[in-house]
Amino acid sequence: MNRLLPIVLVAAAIVALSAVALYMYGQGQGAGSSDDHEVSPSDNDEDPMPDDGDGDGSEGKDADDMKLILTIDGKRVDVEWEDNPSVEAVRNLASKTLTVNMQQYGGFEQTGNMPSSIVSSDSWMSVGSGDIVLYRGVQICLYFDDNAYNFTRLGKMTGITDSEIRSLLDKPGVTAIFTLE
């Protein structure tokens, strides 16, 4: 019995450290700082957008008429966006370009923090390759494999195969850029 005691203590310490790590990951790596605020769909409304001089045709267009664009590591990805307040809040952040540096987590997703939390309506759901969800109001998750948890659905990548999605996302980290066009 005395020989088992050190093994049991080490196992208990590993379990405790794992629980702490999962808790810290779930806290959004600093998302709860006092500088953060929740962005609602009406925040950052600018009507109409001024001439930005870049020649892309977006001058004078109302932000509501512009399409939300996702680019992952320089590759533009077509997305069928949900019609909900969370997507509208992402659109508002994207009006000034939203860059999210992401890291692979769990062997099935890329996840990264936005600069501030946004409105969410989490519910239990299953997700799979190509799904884009919001986690705890501040993390955007891009999936290349299956999972299930409490999320707010943002959209689904379209026009891209599961193997292309895996090739794009199954790496240590990616940069996701959200813009309006």
Image: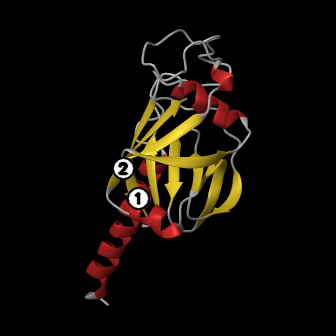
Residue 155 percent location from the top left of the image: 64, 48
Q: Upstream in the sequence, badge 2 or badge 1?
A: 1
Asked which quadrant contains residue 47, the reply is top right
Nearest to viewer (mark 2 / mark 1)? 1
Residue 122 percent location from the top left of the image: 69, 47
- Mark 1 highlights which residue? 168
Between the residue at mark 2 and the residue at mark 1, the CA separation in whole angstroms equals: 8 Å
Relative to 10, is 97 on the left or the right? right
**How dense is the environment of label 1, judged by Cα within 10 Å: few (below 14), some, or many (20 and up)?**
some
Residue 149 percent location from the top left of the image: 62, 59
Which residue is at 66% across, 49% downward?
153
Q: Amino acid at mark 1?
A: Leu
Q: Amino acid at mark 2?
A: Val
| Label pair 2/1, CB-CB below 8 angstroms | yes
Does any portion of residue 116 appear in the rendered image?
Answer: yes
Q: Is residue 114 above or below residue 14?
A: above
Does any portion of residue 138 appear in the rendered image?
Answer: no
Q: Quadrant of the C terminus?
A: top right
SS of the residue at dot 1? helix
Relative to 43, is 11 on the left or the right? left
- Mark 2 highlights which residue? 174
Which residue is at 47% across, 69% downward?
163
Q: Which mark is residue 44?
A: none
Which residue is at 44% across, 60% downward?
19
Q: Is residue 166 above or below residue 117?
A: below
Q: Is residue 64 above or below residue 149?
A: above
**How dense is the environment of label 2, judged by Cα within 10 Å: few (below 14), some, or many (20 and up)?**
many
SS of the residue at dot 2? strand
Q: Is residue 40 above or below residue 123?
A: above
Q: Residue furthest right?
A: 83
Which residue is at 41% across, 55% downward?
20
